[in-house]
Amino acid sequence: MEYLSIIFYKGGKAYYRVTSSNGKMYKASLQRFDGMGAHPPRELSFYKEGTSCLGDADIIDLIGDLSESLLKEPNIDDILGQINKKNVE
């Protein structure tokens, strides 16, 4: 699964591409940051089980925000599947 997530980080928008092969272990790569000052991490990994997340304590708030955004955003595979289904009809 692959997601595109936009979260707020210290006054700016951080655009992350988040991937997971098993739905529990996630990797996030920063695509763009629209902000000044403190820059978010370029790469991070976290483990998600239900509503709980584990990751680096220094960025646990960022991990929590990314995790919450995954619940709200459809993944890219689902979006492409819907587009392809409409094209076939």
Image: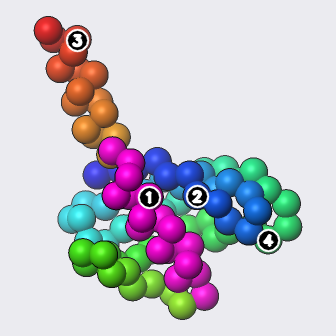
**C-alpha separation, residue under disc 3 versus residue under disc 1:** 28 Å
Q: Are marks 2 and 1 in contact (CB under 8 Å)?
A: yes
Question: Which residues are the magenta region?
Answer: 58-74
Q: Are marks 1 and 4 in contact (CB under 8 Å)?
A: no
Q: Tell me which numbered mark, 2 or 1, is placed earlier along the sequence.
A: 2
Q: Amino acid at mark 3?
A: Asn
Q: Amino acid at mark 2?
A: Ile
Q: Is residue 1 visible?
A: yes
Q: Amino acid at mark 4?
A: Ala
Residue 66 colored in magenta in the image:
yes
Mark 2 or mark 3, whichever is nearer to me: 2
Judging by the rendered image, the residue that carries numbered circle 3 is 87
Label drawn at residue 7: 2
Q: Secondary structure at mark 1?
A: helix
Report whether 36 appears left or right of 18: right
* Residue at 33 percent of width and 81 percent of height: 52
Mark 4 or mark 2, whichever is nearer to me: 2
Judging by the rendered image, the residue that carries numbered circle 4 is 38
Which residue, as the protein is rendered here, is positioned at the far bottom? 57
Q: Percent from the top left, x then y, of residue 71?
A: 34, 58
Q: Tell me which numbered mark, 4 or 3, is placed earlier along the sequence.
A: 4
